[in-house]
Structure formats: C-alpha cells, structure tokens
Image: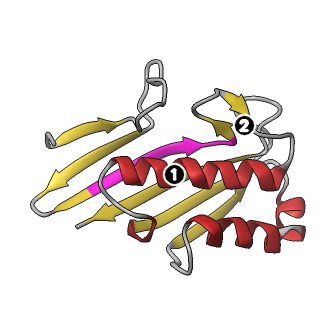
Amino acid sequence: MKAFEPINPEGWLRAPGWSHAIAVKTGEVTFVKIAGQVGWDMTTQQLVADDLAAQYEQAIKNICSIVSAAGGEPQDIVELRIYTTNVKEYNERIKEMGQAYQNHIGKHFPTITLVGVTDLFKEEIKVEIEATAVIS
C-alpha cells in the first residue's frame, strides 16, 4: 500500500470524482477515513428500501466492506458519525438499529455521534454514516 491510497472494495464501481475511503499508512498502523455511506447496495447500485432501518443496515454493511478491503475488520472501527433526516424515528427504532449494528459489527463500541439534518444528497436517503478505522 502507498502512504495514501483510495480504497474501493472488489465489485464496487469506482466513485466518480471522489473516493469511498482513503487509507493512510503510518508505520505499522493504517488509518482509514470512510466517506458517508448510505443505503445503496454497491453491487446493484440500488437503494435497498425506503426504510430507515434497512438503509442504516446497508450503510453499516458498506462500511464493513470498506474496512475489510483495507485489510481490517469491524472491530477496527473507532468512530461513526450518523446523519439522519429523522432523529425521532431513529430513536423510536433504536433497537432495530442496534440489532443491525450487532449483526455486522458485534459488541464493539466505537465513538458514535448522531446528527439530525434537514436533507441528505437525495430525497429518498434517510441516513448517511461516516466512519474512521485504525488497523494495526
């Protein structure tokens, strides 16, 4: 790996004009900054559903795929920043979000920030998640 390398999981289309993630290697540690992931199935290029929990789970899957492509595992995730257009619904469905999280990341608990926003990049997108991983 170069000192600064874009990460694009196998089977994903290359992002036009940006990177899904950038890995920066410093000594024995690789820092991976992951761009906001949404409920797109990256192999079909389709939104998985018009449902907050389903979009959340797909975004988590996407993050885990990126971390794996960088040579890490979900337990290497140190930060999640979650943007949602409906904080009230997110909180009402927190158990579903927690189950989706545990299905892919397990009982590993990085820092998490939840931010309510008016809009995301497309009207049908209900949640977007940025992440940082540290792989050693």
Name above or below for residue 126 compared with residue 135. Answer: above
Q: Which residues are magenta?
A: 31-39
Give the quadrant of the N terminus. top left
Along the line of sight, which residue is nearer the eye, 102 or 25?
102
Task: Identify which residue is drawn at 75% across, 66% down.
Answer: 97
Q: Give the vertical position of 122 relative to 26 (above or below).
A: above
Alpha carbon separation for disc pair 2 and 1: 18 Å
Q: Nearer the viewer, residue 134 or 72?
A: 72
Colour scheme in use: secondary structure
Say which residue appears at 82% left-offset and 40% top-offset. 49
Dot 1 alpha-carbon crowd within 10 angstroms: few under 14, some 14 to 19, many 20 or more: many
What x and y, as percent, mark residue 9? 41, 38
Residue located beneath label 2 in the image: 120
Residue toward you, 105 or 5: 105
Q: Is residue 11 left or right of residue 118?
A: left
Up/down of 80 relative to 69, above or below? below
Numbered disc in front, either 2 or 1? 1
**In the rendering, which numbered label is found on residue 63?**
1
Q: Amino acid at mark 1?
A: Ile
Q: Residue at x 51, y 51 (%)?
A: 63
Horizontal and vertical percent for residue 122?
75, 29
The tag earlier along the polypeptide, 2 or 1, is 1
